[in-house]
Amino acid sequence: MRILILNPPASDGASYIREGRCMQSRSSWTELFPPITLMYLSSSLRERGFEVQLVDSVAQGISWQETLEHLLSRAPELLVLNTAFPSIRSDMDFARQAKELVSGMKTVAVGVFPTLLPREGLQAFPWLDHAVVGEPERAVVALAERLAHGADGAGLPSLAWREDGQVRVSEERDLVQDLDSLVFPDRDSIPSDLFRFPLTGDPLTMISLSRGCPHSCIYCLAPLYYGRRERRRSAESALAEIRECVRRHGIRHFIFWGEMVSSRRSVLVDLCEALVREGLDICWMGAARADQLDDELLALMRRSGCYMLTLGLESSSQAILDEVRKGLKVEDGIQAAQAIRRAGIKVMGHFVVGLPGETEETARASRVFARRHCDYAQFYCAVPYPGTELAERGRAHGWLREADWTEYDFPRALLDLPGFSAERAEVLRRRAFVEFYFRPEVVWANLRRMKPREVLKRLDFRSWMKG
Ligand code: SF4
């Protein structure tokens, strides 16, 4: 059976990041990621003997028309389409055109959109045959095996399908319990130099260390997409993949992907010690939780090649952190940022503008906090994705704006909080970026770290203003 896994181009020519819970249109502040979910899917299907092609039209710069022509020449029997909220109309437009072009081809959507709205998606887009709820490996492999035997996907876990004119969604989820059992992601299909480490521009890939998060932050998609139980890969398995990236693909820069690299200290320690012992000379960054770090661990992480840690700090207001059930004290964030810097690692702070309780003053204080404690910062608007508690609260309090699915994007605010409008959140998010990155010392430090082509990329002022 021929299968095409596609990160589709966008009808407006924009580049979209569609990686699990990380979905947004690309801008000056964001880099494209390797499509790690699709790469895992590709290798999982290959392992089961399917004839698979993986195409990332966004990263490979393949236009809409060229992608359709490729599809026609390839004539797959199953098209697996990566989707995201901001690009969903374009994604589904592509699926429609593809379906018209290749007769008999089945289409299945993966990503956060079908995870949160499988029923609505199949109802709104009748040419879409299936939607995967959550991580896709098991569901798509099972679907492909059914299709290969002339059956359909009815009743499979983690899937939505049509039956007797009705859309049905399986209640059962099929998550990969043992992450070590997954074959390494397919890195042969997409040139390894397409993705670049921010600032330096070195070739970059992602190593998935864990899936799922047990915490209950009311705005977050991670537990909805990957589940509330954290599944963690062993240090040996991650190390073997890193070794392969270095020796076979010549990649030395990594994002360690997962909600928190720091969640299981012993596994992280084993991995870092092995990296030091093997002298692989890599550079990596990852997300950590502010209450899981200490000087000893950070020193080891630094020795193993850790360049930067991202912290979900969200706000400098304790009342807001409590309101969104972050489970952290503001002081945890301060101490973590100080310890990270002491270890010689950069701090990337993530902040959310417009969470419940936000005011002009709390937003201003968070901007000051970011400048004081972080080397880099990302600012998002609070996005009330369907199915999150944030959306439920927004609806219950009358804060939630009616919006098209494509408006669920981090530069867009959709909550009109008491005394703090959605427009104001968008304005203050842009201001936060400008205040953070246009400080002379920051401009100078970044210019010194950047390679010339990275400097040029960031001189596109239109996308600076878009954020
Ligand atoms: S700790 Fe991070 S990943 Fe987990 S629910 Fe909160 S924001 Fe999401």
Image: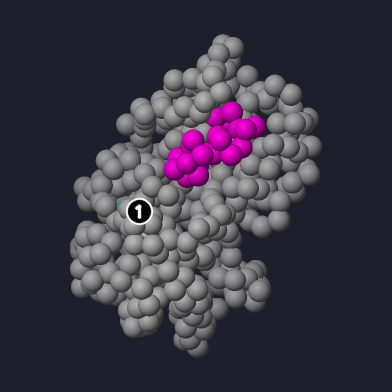
Q: Which residue is mark 1?
A: 392
- Which quadrant of the rendered structure holds the N terminus? top right
Residue found 58% across the figure and 68% down from its top: 28
Q: With respect to residue 175, does 201 lie above or below?
A: below
Q: Note whether residue 372 is visible.
A: no
Q: 405 or 107: nearer the eye?
A: 405
Label 1 crowd (10 A; few <14 / some 14-19 / many >=20): some
Q: Is residue 59 visible?
A: yes
Q: How many marks?
A: 1
Whole-percent x and y of residue 342?
28, 73
Colour scheme employed for the rendering of this structure = one colour
Q: Quadrant of the C terminus?
A: bottom right
Residue 359 % position (x, y) = 35, 78
Would you identify the image quadrant in which residue 182 lies? top left
Magenta segment range?
108-130
Tell me what residue is drawn at x 25 percent, y 64 percent.
323
* Relative height, residue 236 to residue 14 (above, below): above
Left or right, residue 262 beside residue 458: left
Residue pushed farthest top? 149
